[in-house]
Amino acid sequence: MEESLPRRKRPAHFPLRESFNLSQIVLLTVCTAQRRPLLARDEIVSLLIESWQKADSWTVGRYTVLPDHLHLFCAPASDLAPSLSTWVKFWKALVARRWPNADEQPIWQPSFWDRQLRSNDHYSQRWEYVRNNPVRHKLASTADAWPWQGELCAFRFHDKS
C-alpha cells in the first residue's frame, strides 16, 4: 500500500541565492483568491503596473497577466531591497486598496510561487513558457495576440563570463 506524502499548504520561499556578480532574477506567479477571473482587463493591468512602479524596491521586467493569475520577472533594485515576500505583500496591498470593485475583495491568494533563475538560457526558456501561457489556456491564438503582457524593465542575465 502506497503511503501518501505530506503536501505543502503554502509554497516554500527560499532566500535569493547570491553568487559573485551574477544577476538575481526571479520568476513570480501570483493567483487571485479562489482563482477568480479578475485580472485580464485594461484598467486592472494599468493598476498593476502603477503599483509595481510605486513598489520600486524591486524592479519588474517582463510580465503576462491572465484572468486568474499573473507571471512576472523581478529583481531586487538594490542590496537594501526588502525580501521578496515583503515586496509582494506591499504591491498586493496597493492594488487591493485601489481596486475598482469593492465586492470583488479579497483579490489575492495569500502567497505566491517563485523561482530564481540560473542563467540567460533559463530566463529565455521561462519567458517562452510565460508568454505562451494564454495560448495554452486557449485565451489567444498566438502569444503576440494576448494584449496583457509586456516589459517594464529590460533584464539581462549577467553570467560569470
Image (cartoon, helix red, strand yellow):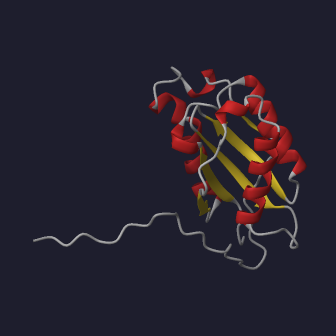
Residue occupying image coordinates x 67% and y 39%: 105
Residue occupying image coordinates x 62% and y 25%: 144
Is residue 126 or residue 50 the one in the foreground?
Answer: 50
* Rendered view: 121 above or below 34: below
Q: Is residue 25 left or right of residue 139?
A: right
* Rendered view: 145 above or below 85: above
Residue 142 placement: quadrant:
top right
Question: Where the C terminus falls, by quadrant?
Answer: bottom right
Is residue 131 or residue 101 the one in the foreground?
Answer: 101
Q: Is residue 76 left or right of residue 7?
A: right
* Rendered view: 16 above or below 87: below
Outermost residue, left direction?
1
Residue 113 image offset from top left, x and y in percent: 57, 57
Q: Could one spot residue 5 in this view of the protein? A: yes
Residue occupying image coordinates x 64% and y 28%: 40
Q: Could one spot residue 153 in this view of the protein? A: no
Residue 123 placement: quadrant:
bottom right
Residue 54 image offset from top left, x and y in percent: 90, 48
Q: Is residue 67 left or right of residue 63?
A: left
Q: Is residue 130 left or right of residue 58?
A: left
Question: Where the N terminus falls, by quadrant?
Answer: bottom left
Is residue 67 or residue 59 the one in the foreground?
Answer: 67
Is residue 131 or residue 14 the one in the foreground?
Answer: 14
Residue 159 image offset from top left, x and y in percent: 71, 67
Outermost residue, front direction?
103
Residue 80 image offset from top left, x and y in percent: 88, 72
- Give the number of callouts: 0
Residue 85 placement: quadrant:
bottom right
